[in-house]
Image (cartoon, helix red, strand yellow):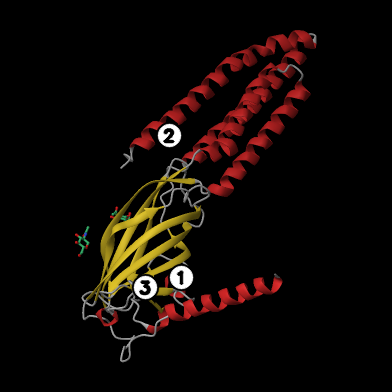
């Protein structure tokens, strides 16, 4: 029984290795892999976005996994084989030298050729090359509206060595495919994407290129949890302090509240310091902290009124508390009202005005 099993394994291994050997073609004799298949060649490109790993707002870059499908016609490889496609190792045939123009690391697209990727050649000489790439790309960002921002992250593919009449890049009929769950882990949702042809002009020639802009909309939920909700709680606590009669308790509550608000602001600042301009999130934390500071200031004013009255009129402290509370009573109503007005106005502007600047396509 065991021997039979071993024999089967052996048989399978032999057959399988025989198959790979047969699949692997040698380029036809006289084939020069350094020679372009035609004086002017058109190279078709299609991209599948498999997974967006992250978008870094601080470093203005994003990382994603792509499947790049390249096709071109090399008539020298046309065949009349029984099988529809023959496959060749990539180091035996001519491969167009294309790179991602806005890639941050050394070219992954060329690096991907070094592993055991293969090309498949149809009977007419149509060559198909699929490459899986995981790379970081630069994405210029305008963060004025952060965290209600919408970013256009480009992906630019360009010919590296062959200039324009020699090599023309073209989008395949279905240029970009985005996998269903490609954006599930990131803080962004994909709104739309646009593709276009472009040319990149350098001192030594004009090169063909292709561009796709991924329009990404930032998810707001993490900022509600990390910043907006805690900040609102801080201001609510500061407003509640107007009801506290006992001075030591009130000063402790206000100080802790102020420290808490400053800490929350720091956490938000850590993820959102992008330069020397004010973002929407800075406005919110700034105004919220101002409200907590005002509550503290009000307490100082109430205390000094209390002290002065105590010295001049020499009344019992109970009486004085009640008198100097006039300011407290006003603040109990005015501060929450003002803050509620600010929060409502802020979110109204954020959700309606900013969103309407970019009609969904
Ligand atoms: C892609 O974005 C760039 C930079 O914002 C812009 O110049 C270009 O026209 C955009 N292309 C498309 C097809 O939207
Ligand atoms: C892109 O190039 C192809 C082939 O040259 C052409 O048919 C198509 O109209 C071009 N598209 C744009 C937007 O220029």
**Mark 3 Cβ inside 8 Å of ligand 2:** no
Q: Where is 12 relative to 198, above or below?
A: below
Q: Residue 315 versus residue 91: which sits nearer the camera?
A: 91
Dot 1 surroundings within 10 Å: few (below 14), some, or many (20 or more)? some
Name the quadrant containing residue 227: top right
Write down the residue under mark 3.
120
> Could you tell which of marks 1 and 2 lies nearer the N-terminus?
1
185 on left or right of 300: left
Image disc number at residue 323? none
Write down the residue under mark 1.
108
Residue at the image point whose x is 65% and y is 71% from the top? 5
Q: Residue 135 versus residue 304: which sits nearer the camera?
A: 135
**Residue 319 coordinates in the image, percent (x, y):** 75, 7
> Could you tell which of marks 1 and 3 lies nearer the N-terminus?
1
Residue at the image point whose x is 63% and y is 22% from the top? 239
Write down the residue under mark 2.
350
**Mark 2 Cβ inside 8 Å of ligand 1:** no
Dot 3 surroundings within 10 Å: few (below 14), some, or many (20 or more)? some
87 on left or right of 126: right
Residue at the image point whose x is 31% and y is 69% from the top? 71
SS of the residue at dot 2?
Answer: helix
**Residue 267 coordinates in the image, percent (x, y):** 61, 44
Judge depth for marks 1 and 2 and give the one in front: 1
**Residue 54 coordinates in the image, percent (x, y):** 51, 54
Q: Can see residue 11?
A: yes
Q: Where is 108 relative to 337, above or below?
A: below
């Amino acid at each position: 029984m065991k021997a039979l099993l071993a024999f089967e394994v052996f048989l399978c291994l032999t057959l399988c290795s025989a198959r790979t050997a047969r699949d692997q073609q040698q380029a036809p004799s006289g084939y020069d892999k350094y020679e372009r298949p035609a004086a002017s060649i058109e190279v078709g490109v299609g991209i599948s976005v498999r997974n967006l790993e992250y978008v870094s707002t601080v470093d203005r870059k994003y990382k994603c996994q792509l499947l790049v499908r390249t096709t071109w016609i090399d008539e020298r490889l046309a065949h009349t084989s029984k099988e529809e496609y023959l496959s060749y190792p990539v180091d035996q045939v001519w491969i167009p030298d294309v790179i991602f123009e806005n890639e941050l690391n050394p070219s992954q697209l060329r690096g991907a050729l070094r592993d055991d990727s293969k090309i498949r050649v149809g009977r007419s000489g149509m060559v198909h090359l699929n490459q899986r790439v995981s790379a970081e790309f630069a994405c210029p960002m305008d963060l004025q509206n952060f965290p209600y921002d919408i970013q256009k992250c480009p992906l630019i593919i360009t010919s590296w060595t062959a200039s324009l009449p020699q090599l023309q890049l073209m989008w395949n009929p279905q240029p970009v495919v985005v996998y269903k769950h490609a954006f599930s882990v990131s803080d962004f949702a994909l709104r739309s994407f646009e593709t276009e042809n472009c040319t990149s002009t350098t001192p030594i020639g004009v090169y063909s290129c292709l561009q796709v802009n991924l329009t990404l909309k930032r998810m707001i939920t993490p900022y509600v949890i990390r910043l907006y909700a805690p900040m609102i709680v801080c201001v609510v606590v500061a407003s509640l302090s107007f009801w506290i009669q006992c001075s030591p308790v009130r000063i402790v509550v206000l100080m802790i509240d102020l420290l808490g608000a400053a800490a929350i602001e720091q956490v938000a600042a850590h993820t959102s310091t992008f330069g020397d301009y004010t973002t929407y999130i800075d406005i919110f934390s700034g105004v919220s902290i101002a409200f907590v500071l005002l509550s503290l200031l009000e307490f100082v004013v109430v205390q000094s009124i209390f002290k002065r009255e105590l010295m001049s009129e020499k009344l019992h402290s109970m009486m004085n508390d009640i008198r100097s509370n006039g300011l407290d009573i006003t603040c109990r109503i005015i501060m929450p009202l003002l803050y509620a007005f600010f929060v409502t106005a802020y979110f109204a502007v954020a959700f309606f005005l900013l969103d309407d600047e970019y009609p969904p396509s």
